[in-house]
Image: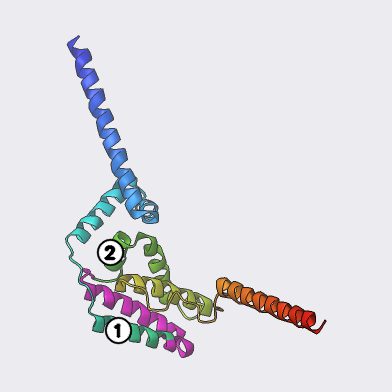
Amino acid sequence: MNWMIVVLVIVAIVVVIAVAMQMRSARLKRRFGPEYEHTVEETGNRRTAEAELRARAKRRAEVELRELSPEALADYRDRWHDVQAEFVDDPRGAVAHADALVEEVMRDRGYPIDGFDAGVDMVSVDHPDLAETYRAAHAIGQRSAQEASLDDLREAMQHYHVLFDELLGEPEPGSDVDPDAEPEPDFESESESESESDSDAEHDVDDSTSTEERSL
C-alpha cells in the first residue's frame, strides 16, 4: 500500500513539473513571439533556447533606460534625414550609417551594447517583432556590392527606419500623414449648402408666383 502512495506522489510531482514547464514555455512564446521560434531553430534545442531567452530578459531587466531629451530627439531626426538624403548618391554608405545611428541611439538610451549580437538581443526583448528585420537589414549591409541590389539596400533602410522610430520612443511627426492625400469631402457642409440652395430656389418660385398673381 505504501509503495502505491509513493508512486502516486511521484506521478503527481511529474505532472506538476510538466505543467509548470508548459506554462513557462507559453509565457516565453507570448513575450518573444517570432523570436521564440527563431531562437529554437538557431540553437536546435527548445530547452536551450528558452534558457537563452530567459537570460536575455534578465539582462534587460537589469537595465534602466533613459528618455531622450527634446534636443537629442531633434538632433537624431536631423541626422536620420541626412542619412536618407545620402541614400540617393551612396546607398551602401547610407545603410552603413543607418546601422551605426541605430546602435548609437541604443547606447544613448542605456542599452548595454557590445556589438551587433548584443544589440539584437536587447531589441528581441523590447521589440521582438523587429529583431528579425534588424538582422535582415544588418545582413544586407554586410553583403558585397555584387550581392546587394539597390532594392535590397532600400529594404534595409526601411527596416532601419522602423526600428529607429521605435528606439526613439515616438514616431516622426507627420510620418503617418500622406501629403498627397486629398482632404475628405465635408458631406455635412455640402448637405447644408444644397439645403440652402433648395430653400433659395423655393423662395424664387414663391416670389415669381406672387408676381404673376399680382399681374393677373
Residue 131, compared with residue 99, is above or below; it is: above
Helix, strand or loop under label 1: helix
Q: Residue 160's x, y, as percent?
A: 39, 74
Q: Amino acid at mark 1?
A: Ala
Foreground label between 2 and 1: 1
Per the image, the residue denoted by label 1 is 74
Q: Which residues are magenta?
A: 85-113
Quarter that holds the C terminus: bottom right
Q: Amino acid at mark 2?
A: Met
Quadrant of residue 19 within the rendered picture: top left
> Which residue is located at x 76 percent, y 78 percent?
209
Q: Residue 15's x, y, as percent?
A: 28, 29
Q: Residue 75's x, y, as percent?
A: 29, 85
Q: Do callouts 2 and 1 mark residues in contact (Cβ within 8 Å)?
A: no
Per the image, the residue denoted by label 2 is 122
Quarter that holds the N terminus: top left
Q: Residue 104's x, y, as percent?
A: 27, 78
